[in-house]
Image (cartoon, rainbow, N blue to C red):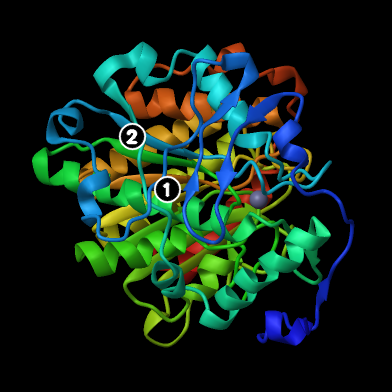
Amino acid sequence: MELQTLFPTSFGGNLLFLAQNHICKWKNHPRFGSDAKIMGHGCILKHMRPRRYSSKNFGASISCSTGVKEDSFVPPPTQLADAKVIYSVAPAMGHNQESHPESNFRVPAIVSALEKMELTPKFRGSEMIELQNFRPASVDDVASVHARAYLSGLEKAMDQASEQGIIFIDGSGPTYATSTTFQESLIAAGAGISLVDSVVAASRLRRHPPTGFALIRPPGHHAVPKGPMGFCVFGNVAIAARYAQRVHGLKRVFIIDFDVHHGNGTNDAFYDDPDIFFLSTHQDGSYPGTGKIDEVGDGNGEGTTLNLPLPGGSGDIAMRTVFDEVILPCAQRFQPDIILVSAGYDGHVLDPLASLQFTTGTYYMLASNIKQLAKDICGGRCIFFLEGGYNLDSLSYSVGDSFRALLGERSLAFEFDNPAILYEEPSTKVKQAIQRVKHIHSL
Ligand SMILES: [Zn+2]
């Protein structure tokens, strides 16, 4: 097959097909068994069980949505009435490359930590809902953000991936794809938009709906409209933003991206859109090098993109100031109908891919403050989407403590964080960056 026919966009000709025979290794993975069945390009039935926690089913039983009323996957009002947190799990067990940081260990590690920390419905009863049934995103959902040529090219590439085991998309980060990547990426995006359905439905029933959390991969915020990038396949948050507008009439969407890297894909998708505010904090100079402070949007969207690069070494003090002085006033001024969060945990001091100094407590603070912000300005409608985070321990504890924040419980970050490994934050440079972004955006 000609590569140009796979990716006729800017990624055409850049595909390298390498490393054969990786396919289906995950099925026999020593830590996580699976009896996942993948049936053609249609539905996927998944009943994945981690061997260490055999009582737990991973993810959802996913049905074809053909002919099924869209909101039939929304939990009944009796369940939505009590819940504080609603989450979905889509671990993409077939999308994996050995030794790659964005691995299929990530979501299972989080799920295991949630169980250990007693943060699942089994322990919390009606306070928490795990969305057991959801539909994959449709091609039309994804095409609200991405070029159809990219989608058809990726779907076609799945045959190639079946033969080769794994394919690499050169110039994209690099981003890999296996034979299940297309379907599992639709499932990840679907796990996000299904939470939009549930949170919006709950917000019609009560003043303070549960906060959503999509424990999904592959991540999304680097994927640009024309193709994959930086471990990301489909822009999960961007797709959910368009879905919230189109299906639920929520016109104004505020996106907070606190991943350590710039969310360039989301940035590009809405750069000229005045109704979607994209606010990204990231480490200055980190991948992919975009997100400079003067990148503020274009045309009608000028002013509805805010990029705040933070100097390496920035940590908890920096992020608390950023929340109070930048995120809060920005969101209050924009008056959104819903808040979506690109929740990347690679700014943690223990993360191997970057050099910020966020702690588990920083992520607790962000989750707690963002939940309160959503209550104050948009009826509590708020959904977090997992992005990066590559140290499995700091990732899973930080997500766990974020869940505690969303439940309104005290932080247990002190059990995990070790202040002795922190060094002094570059406070002068942080202050300068904050002052500059406040000046540019008249905050
Ligand atoms: Zn990242």
Give how far across and how far down residue 230 sits, in percent.
70, 60
Give how far across and how far down residue 184 sits, in percent.
56, 52
Horizontally, residue 294 falls left or right of residue 85, namely: right
Q: Quadrant of residue 317?
A: top right
Say what amino acid the circle numbered 2 marks: Ile
Quarter of the N terminus within the rendering:
bottom right
Give how far across and how far down residue 202 sits, in percent.
18, 41
Is the residue 391 above or below the residue 8 in the image? above
> Which is more toward the observer, 172 or 153?
153
Say what amino acid the circle numbered 1 marks: Ala
Judging by the rendered image, the residue that carries numbered circle 1 is 191
Q: Quadrant of residue 394?
A: top right
What residue lies at 42% left-to-right and 88% top-to-bottom?
A: 299
Q: Secondary structure at mark 2?
A: strand
Q: Quadrant of residue 129?
A: top left
Asked whether residue 443 is in view, the answer is yes
Task: Kindly give the residue lying farthest to the right in the view shown.
Answer: 19
> Which is more toward the observer, 139 or 42?
42
Residue mark closest to the camera, 1 vs 2:
1
> Which is more toward the observer, 142 or 350?
142
Horizontally, residue 71 falls left or right of residue 88, namely: left
Q: Is the CB of mark 1 within 8 Å of ligand 1?
A: no
Is the residue 137 above or below the residue 395 in the image? below
Judging by the rendered image, the residue that carries numbered circle 2 is 86
Asked whether residue 416 is in view, the answer is no
> Which is more toward the observer, 218 or 39?
39
Q: Are there few (<14), some (14-19), or many (20+) residues within 10 Å of tag 2?
A: many
What residue lies at 45% left-to-right and 64% top-to-bottom?
A: 238
